[in-house]
Image: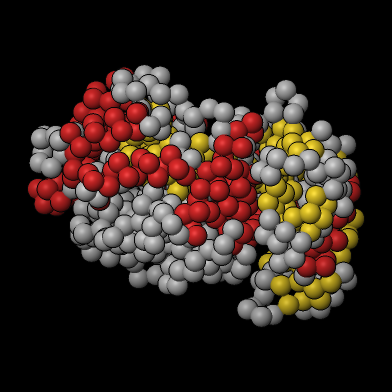
């Protein structure tokens, strides 16, 4: 077993040598060394090469590549190759194919053409994992195991009969009886009462709205089912290849909402993720930084792996713009600033054929003498220069709470407003704090909140009693807590908390909301301080100070913002989506009340600053200039990327980055 690269940040990505003749493999190794590559992921989509016929294995080519990596001192993150079944398997067992909500079979011809509940797939996958683990456990290139790939990217949810039976088994374990299920799902409505669990189906196509808790539980079931696949493969690796770290690559991206990574993260030896910029987002770079904080939260603050991102364009958006010169380096180092200790890409060499032939790579179609490959080499040098950051953690005094199960519930059928997109408020808070030079963690409501001075609860529609109590306890212990509209509304069964909104937080905030009045697209309301959009409500303060009221619309005179002293801390409420100036003023008040300072004083607008600190007290501040002009800031130390001392002042060019060892 090879140790994970030390003395540098690991750097590399997916390597798919089976796409190329052997004559290219030696050139690849030479180019990897030229670029500073220190790890590769092998075998992700190699099942049809490793097992060309059922029970017949061909490892010769992989032996050769593994040996090449060992000779080049490149660590291998070896995949179990179970991400996508080979054609012989789906031809022999078409019953393992997934189905849509309309019952349409999703046929082979792309990838992930397997039903998450299929025992046929599970048996075949585990047989392959057994062979791979036995063969490569002691190989000198092996440094990590990579189970499957991007779970649920294409085959969840599945609505086939196999999933229906598995769902009923899952419900029996969760509820124990049909009466308990009826109570949890509220089936007294619309004559949905079940008399036998065998009557329950997946939420397939129906005449109108589904039962919301039925849909919520199907999300939970899907996530748990794929987690069982992961754990099944991990158990084989633990038995046959003990001591080798195991991971699978998450997809912490705004668009991906199918798995509850909070329940997956504790089973990873190291949390790893894939992140790709989406050109149509209002602020793709802000989303990148937010998702870095999300991944950091899943890792419980520990360093994490950026398993995949892109050097330039991707292939799966309607329009796929290239990254500007310098953006490959900037995006990578922004992930590092947010806690990544590994910089990985899909893929090493751009494909000549196949569905991802237009996806960028470390070696582009233009070859190694291109400007893009020159930037790849600069990034490899940067990864080596930043080695001393490895193991350090990001400093943050703010927590933004995020829960996938609350997202699922808030995205359910027949909601008050489809304009309320669950992550939007969380991302807006993160971006606004970033612009002030303040770093925020993004964590689950179950996280230890005791170290945070400001806690933001954004549109946390679903919340358990225990999580609500923990948030209240944090306020009583001295934290400033901001709760926004549409939070605390339902319990874990998606049942409305009666007696006035915001249910779970009503007593903490000292308010009662009697009715929602969500706003139509393009509509707004005036406030005594500014303007609001998306949401309004009839809110009265019972035991709270009114900070702002609605001054127009049906809710005029009602409270729009409130605050209340709670023990040593405070509880604030925001009942609308305010304009930028109003939102900025509210956050300034919260930051002041919490006694939080920016990572660097006097940070120029548009420059992001994040501090990482080692256990021995050493600290580094990562600086990213998101503007189109040079920016100067006060910072003392040595920039690891340039090797130059800052002498108390540093000027970054447009789009420039620096990582300064302080002191």
Q: Is residue 605 left or right of residue 98?
A: right
Quarter of the rendering containing residue 133: top left
Residue 77, placed above or below residue 163: above
Identify the residue at image location x=77%, y=70%. 579
- The residue lying toward the viewer, choosing from 111 and 334, is 334
User: Is residue 310 at all visible to an observer of this figure?
Assistant: no
Where residue 395 appears, as percent x and y from the top left, is: 73, 37
Quarter of the rendering containing residue 32: top left
Q: What colouring style does the render use?
A: secondary structure
- Return the residue found at the far front: 369
Q: Is residue 7 left or right of residue 470?
A: left
Where residue 112 appears, as percent x and y from the top left, is: 28, 51
Q: Is residue 49 left or right of residue 231?
A: left
Where residue 153 appears, as percent x and y from the top left, is: 38, 53
User: Is residue 367 at all visible to an observer of this figure?
Assistant: yes
Quadrant, the C terminus: top right
Q: Is residue 157 left or right of residue 377?
A: left
Where residue 512 appears, as percent x and y from the top left, is: 77, 57
Identify the residue at image location x=78%, y=68%. 580
Identify the residue at image location x=11%, y=34%. 55
Identify the residue at image location x=10%, y=35%. 56
How many numbered discs?
A: 0
Quadrant, the N terminus: top left
């Amino acid at each position: 077993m090879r140790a994970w690269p030390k003395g540098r940040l690991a750097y590399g990505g997916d390597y798919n040598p089976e796409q190329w003749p052997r004559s290219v493999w030696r050139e690849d190794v030479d180019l990897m060394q030229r670029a500073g590559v220190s790890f590769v992921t092998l075998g992700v989509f190699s099942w049809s090469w490793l097992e060309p016929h059922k029970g017949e294995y061909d490892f010769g080519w992989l032996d050769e590549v593994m040996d090449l990596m060992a000779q080049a001192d490149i660590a291998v993150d070896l995949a179990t190759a179970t991400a996508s079944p080979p054609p012989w398997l789906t031809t022999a067992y078409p019953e393992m194919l997934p189905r849509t909500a309309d019952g349409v079979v999703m046929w082979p011809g792309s990838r992930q053409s397997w039903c998450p509940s299929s025992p046929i797939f599970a048996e075949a996958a585990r047989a392959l994992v057994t062979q791979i683990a036995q063969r490569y456990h002691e190989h000198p290139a092996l440094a990590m195991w990579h189970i499957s790939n991007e779970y649920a990217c294409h085959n969840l949810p599945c609505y086939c009969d196999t999933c229906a039976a598995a769902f009923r088994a899952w419900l029996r374990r969760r509820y124990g009886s049909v009466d308990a299920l009826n109570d949890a799902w509220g089936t007294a409505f619309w004559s949905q009462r079940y008399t036998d669990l065998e009557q329950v189906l997946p939420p397939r196509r129906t005449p109108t709205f589904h039962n919301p808790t039925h849909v919520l539980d199907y999300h939970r079931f899907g996530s748990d089912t794929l987690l069982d696949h992961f754990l099944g493969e991990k158990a084989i690796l633990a038995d046959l290849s003990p001591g080798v770290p195991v991971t699978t690559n998450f997809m912490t991206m705004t668009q991906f909402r199918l798995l509850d990574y909070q329940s997956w993260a504790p089973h990873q030896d190291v949390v790893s993720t894939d992140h790709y910029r989406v050109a149509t987002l209002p602020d793709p770079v802000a989303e990148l930084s937010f998702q870095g904080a999300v991944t950091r939260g899943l890792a419980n603050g520990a360093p994490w792996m950026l398993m995949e991102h892109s050097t330039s364009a991707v292939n799966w958006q309607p329009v796929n713009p290239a990254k500007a010169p310098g953006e490959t380096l900037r995006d990578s180092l922004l992930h590092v600033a947010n806690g990544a200790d590994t910089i990985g890409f899909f893929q090493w060499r751009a494909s000549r054929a196949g569905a991802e032939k237009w996806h960028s790579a470390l070696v582009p179609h233009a070859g190694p003498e291109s400007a893009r490959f020159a930037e790849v080499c600069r990034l490899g040098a940067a990864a080596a220069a930043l080695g001393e950051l490895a193991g350090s953690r990001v400093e943050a005094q703010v927590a933004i709470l995020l829960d996938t199960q609350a997202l699922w519930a808030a995205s359910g059928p027949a909601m008050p407003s489809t304009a309320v997109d669950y992550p939007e408020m969380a991302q807006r808070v993160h971006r606004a704090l970033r612009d002030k030079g303040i770093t925020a963690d993004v964590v689950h409501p179950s996280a230890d909140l005791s170290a945070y001075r400001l806690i933001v609860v954004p549109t946390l529609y679903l919340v358990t009693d225990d999580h609500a109590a923990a948030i209240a306890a944090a306020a009583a212990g001295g934290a400033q807590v901001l709760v926004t509209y549409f939070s605390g509304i339902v319990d874990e069964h998606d049942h409305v908390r009666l007696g006035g909104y915001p249910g779970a937080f009503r007593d903490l905030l000292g308010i009662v909301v009697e009715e929602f009045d969500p706003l139509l697209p393009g509509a707004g309301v005036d406030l005594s301080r500014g303007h609001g959009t998306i949401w309004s409500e009839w809110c009265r303060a019972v035991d709270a100070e009114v900070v702002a009221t609605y001054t127009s619309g049906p809710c005029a005179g009602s409270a729009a913002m409130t605050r209340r002293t709670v023990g040593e801390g405070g509880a604030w409420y925001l009942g609308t989506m305010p304009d930028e100036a109003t939102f900025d003023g509210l956050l300034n008040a919260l930051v002041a009340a919490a006694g939080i300072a920016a990572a660097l004083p006097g940070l120029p607008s548009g420059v992001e600053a994040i501090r990482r600190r080692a256990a021995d007290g050493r600290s580094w501040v990562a600086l990213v200039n998101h503007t189109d002009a040079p920016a100067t800031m006060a910072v003392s130390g040595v920039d690891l990327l340039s090797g130059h001392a800052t002498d108390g002042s540093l000027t970054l060019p447009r789009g420039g980055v620096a990582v300064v060892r302080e002191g």
